[in-house]
Amino acid sequence: MGIQFLRGNSQAPKGHAFLIARSSSNPNVVYCTYCIVPPIPMSLAKYLPPLFAAQIPSEDLQEATNLSGMPIPPMLEEVNSLEYIKTLAERRDDDLCDIGTVSSRDEGARMQMAAFSSQEYGQLYSSYFSTLKQPVASTAEIEEAAPLDDLDAEELLLQTMSERQKLSELSKLIGTARYALEGRDSALLQDTKRRMQRIAGLLAEKYRGKELVAAAVNPDERGARLAELYLSRAYKLLDEEYAEIPGIERSIRELSD
């Protein structure tokens, strides 16, 4: 439930991806880093001078040996155009992933988000790569394992998420929905809508999750603005910033009329 693939397949990552995040205060501001998973196992510890290596705890050296996804640059940097990043991803055949929202003023958060999201992307790649080494299961084995599908891992995870985490997830999915609408990708749009409805159904009615979802999948430009307003209103409610809610609701009414 972390990074959302706008281009590519989470079940078969390419090992190189643009990771984008939007400013939590202004969704038009986009930050980006490029994540690479080395195709050949690499240990940073091998390249450290003995003097430095002796000063690093053995646990940290082990982590350096198990290096997976690397963000380049190591901090999310502002980009002039999301369209340019999309074009680059197409031309270079890179994955393109939305990793959520981040504060424009918090450089530490931008660095941490780049590191954590790269690690998550690396884990997805490692999981995919490990399947290439496994023998193909027989039909009988697949049928025997079928009852496990009744356990909905996504639903279980949603149940454990806080309201803030659910809103953050909706924020990511709004971006995915708008991307699907722009690219006329009906399959991605329907899947995104289903996931948004799932999350909205677990939120308290005061957050108006159903209206948010309806706005997010509305192809009209007004839909994108309404979705942002509903999301902003939800965050204001969550943070108990009630004084700012009437103005947001007024803007929602003006766009809805």
Image (spheres, helix red, strand yellow):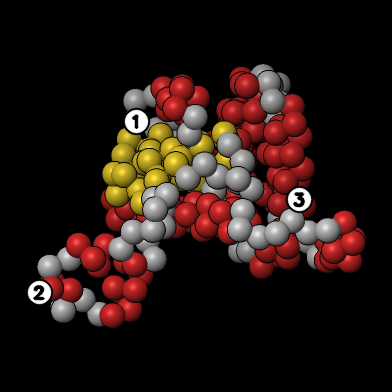
Cα separation, mark 3 vs mark 2, equals: 53 Å
The total number of labels drawn is 3
Which residue is denoted by mark 3 in the rendering? 198
| In this view, the mark in front (2 or 1) | 2
Q: Residues within 10 Å of mark 2 (few under 14, many from 20)?
A: few
* x, y percent for residue 229: 58, 36
Chain-order first, disc 3 or disc 2: 2
Asked where in the image residue 157 lies, by quadrant, the reply is bottom right
Measured in 3D between alpha carbons, the distance from the residue under mark 1 to the one under mark 3, in whole angstroms, is 32 Å
- Place residue 254 in its image quadrant: top right
Q: Residue at x 9, y 74 (%)?
A: 51
Nearest the viewer among 71 and 256 is 71
The residue under label 1 is 79
Callout 1: SS: strand
For mark 3, give the secondary structure. helix
- Is 73 drawn above or below residue 108 in the view shown? above
Q: Nearer the viewer, residue 91 or 210?
A: 91
Please, what is the three-letter code of the amino acid marked with disc 3?
Arg
Q: Which residue is mark 2?
A: 51
Q: Is residue 198 above or below residue 221?
A: below
Nearer to us of marks 1 and 3 is 1
- Residue 165's tag is none
Q: Tell me the residue at 78%/59% (across/down).
A: 137
